[in-house]
Amino acid sequence: MFFDLRLIIAFLFACYGAVLTALGATATTEADRLKTGGWNVNLWVGLVMLGFAAVMGLWAALRPIRPPEGEREDE
Amino acid sequence: MPRSAVRRARLAGGGAGGRLPWAATAHRGSHSTGVAMTPLAAIQLRLEAQPVDYALLALYFALVLGIGTMARRSVSASLDFFLAGRALPAWVTGLAFISANLGAVEIFGMTANGAQFGIPTVHYYWIGAIPAMVFLGLVMMPFYYGSKVRSVPEFLLRRFGRFAHLVNALSFALAQVLIAGVNLYALATVVNLLLGWPLWVSVLAAAAIVLAYTTLGGLSAAVYNEVLQFFVIVAMLVPITLVGLHRVGGWDGLAARVRALNADAELQLHSWPGTNLTGIENAALSVLGIVFGLGFVLSFGYWTTNFAEVQRALAAKDMSAARRTPLIGAYPKALIVLVIVIPGMLAAVLSPELAAYKASGGTLNNGVTYNNAIELLIRDLLPSGMLGVAITGLLAAFMAGMAANVSSFNTVFTYDIWQSYVVRDRVDHYYLRVGRIATVAGCAIAVGTAFIASHYNNIMDYLQTLFSFFNAPLFATFILGMFWRRTSPVAGGVGLLVGTAAAVTIDQLNRHHVLHMSGQGPSFVAASAAFVMDIAVSVPLSLATAPKPDSELGGLVWSLTPRVRAEKDAWYRSPGLLAIGVLALATALSIVYW
């Protein structure tokens, strides 16, 4: 495994989190509030996603992948 | 008629997977409800997806294809392609292990069960999955991983010889491509319903994406995408559950509404005795059916011998990681049922259409069925933004399901059919190329199957039932073969056939009304009969025929396999500890929802 899946997960959820947070903060309509019973689901889920992305990124940064011994270093 | 087909399809095979509820439902949607109903259903379920939702969807699939391209660079030998070079860390294989099972078919089927039966659906997880996953990790994985076999059929070849091997390899390979086709068709139906795209567009687009990343990156690409899909699915299910509970006033509000709407509310709010789920009126027999039929025979047969699952563990980087794969997967498996069953129950009280359907006892022809539960919730609860995440989650789940079928098919086809019986002793690169061609062919057959399924849905329903018969006796043969060295090759093959015949017999007797069982009953009893008959035939046959010499059984049989004491590892990596933890978790959850 020479690329880090954790960083891809972090990237995806950072993007999703940013979009949802922005939507939740700026573009919540009355119809949306009716659907969710007044709970700003985009905003909160967006924030949680940003947090999750940070955790994944941090994990990848603190415990980077070590290439196992004997692995080809060419490529 | 169609309704009984839906029920049978949904229930056949149990939480132990193999059931493809969507096939029969899609049939209802597009055929039996007729021309008049289809546009109505389409109007009801069409989502108001905005450009931002499509952008979220597009980003996901760009990443999926990117992963395929990156994984391509690590494929230089057939083992890289089919088993990810046996180099993946346990958390990746563990999440992929449940993700391969957590396809859209599972999500639709289990939310539907939640909507119809309520809490008893948890048995598919806490009884019907966790113990078997623990058993696989603790007891069986040392044989699979330690013997260095590359597939489950290959284990049968080494242990029992060619007869059992060929039966299993052929039935498995065939089942996987056909099921991939059903997945594809189901995806197209959902996309058609939710977004209005024509069926053939989604069939071809989805097949092209799956084909692209599985031919490029092989199993690593499939596994990485399964992990990504797992998180997106959670990001869909958890908010739906929270918003739904918020709207009804929490669990107490949900329970109050279930009580107000249902005469048998207490059965739906408690996991035991689950008589509504099993269709067995006697409470004691119902419990027995769940514990033995679902919890033991069906579940152990599926989780411990289905190569689409076991393959994920074989891709782990070492024995410890392989054993931890199902154990790590078991934790999210035990928890995720809460955000599957509760949404199902929420849909049945929040959606007026589904509530009306349920109040009619499932006879009302208003364009929705239990299988629409999750779609109704997505439509009614989620604003634009979360909507895009949810659509992505559903499509990702369908594709991951199909990729799991395709990536296990190409492995069994290449190693167990082509290399074992057709063209032997060629260089490794040759088999890598065969694997890629098999992947293309598998996807093509799946596309063909999807189009056939759109015309003859009942055929798919029967095929699926047929494959469940091949699965039923496998666990009995494996367990005998692993723990009784006397079990002979003849017994291995004949046991499988007799077990399958027993399951077919029970099914036919029930279909022709000689036996009278409804609901889950037939599949529990058929599987149990297969298990018992397999053992009853294999034991005397083994005593009467020549066993394999001990020298050929090392690593394949318990008593002839040296115990390897794991080298010192961190305490949290201990398989025993992980197993105790997840069993405690499942027990605690069971008590809470008793």
Image (cartoon, coloured by chain):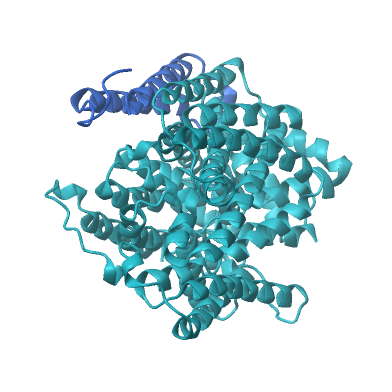
Q: Is residue B161 visible in the rendered structure shown here?
A: yes
Res B258 quadrant in image: bottom right
- B488 relative to A3, above or below: below
Along the line of sight, the residue nearer the viewer: B235 or B87: B87
- Residue lying at the far right in this picture: please name it: B35
Find residue B417 and report its horizontal and vertical position in percent: 57, 50
- Residue lying at the far left in this picture: please name it: B568
Question: What residue is at 60 percent from the left and 78 percent from the top?
Answer: B281
Question: What residue is at 74 percent from the left and 39 percent from the top?
Answer: B448
Res B463 quadrant in image: bottom right
- B136 relative to B497, above or below: above
Find residue B109 and report its horizontal and vertical position in percent: 59, 51
For this view, does B462 lie left or right of residue A5?
right
Quadrant (top left, top right, bottom left, bottom right) of the C terminus of chain B: bottom left
Along the line of sight, the residue nearer the viewer: A53 or B304: B304
Label the cyan chain with its letter. Answer: B
For this view, does B570 lie left or right of residue A33?
left
Label the blue chain with its letter. Answer: A
Res B564 quadrant in image: bottom left
Question: What residue is at 32 percent from the left and 71 percent from the top?
Answer: B550
Along the line of sight, the residue nearer the viewer: B283 or B433: B433
Along the line of sight, the residue nearer the viewer: B353 or B513: B513
Find residue A30 and report its horizontal and vertical position in percent: 57, 22
Find residue B529 and report its horizontal and vertical position in percent: 57, 77
Q: How many marks?
A: 0
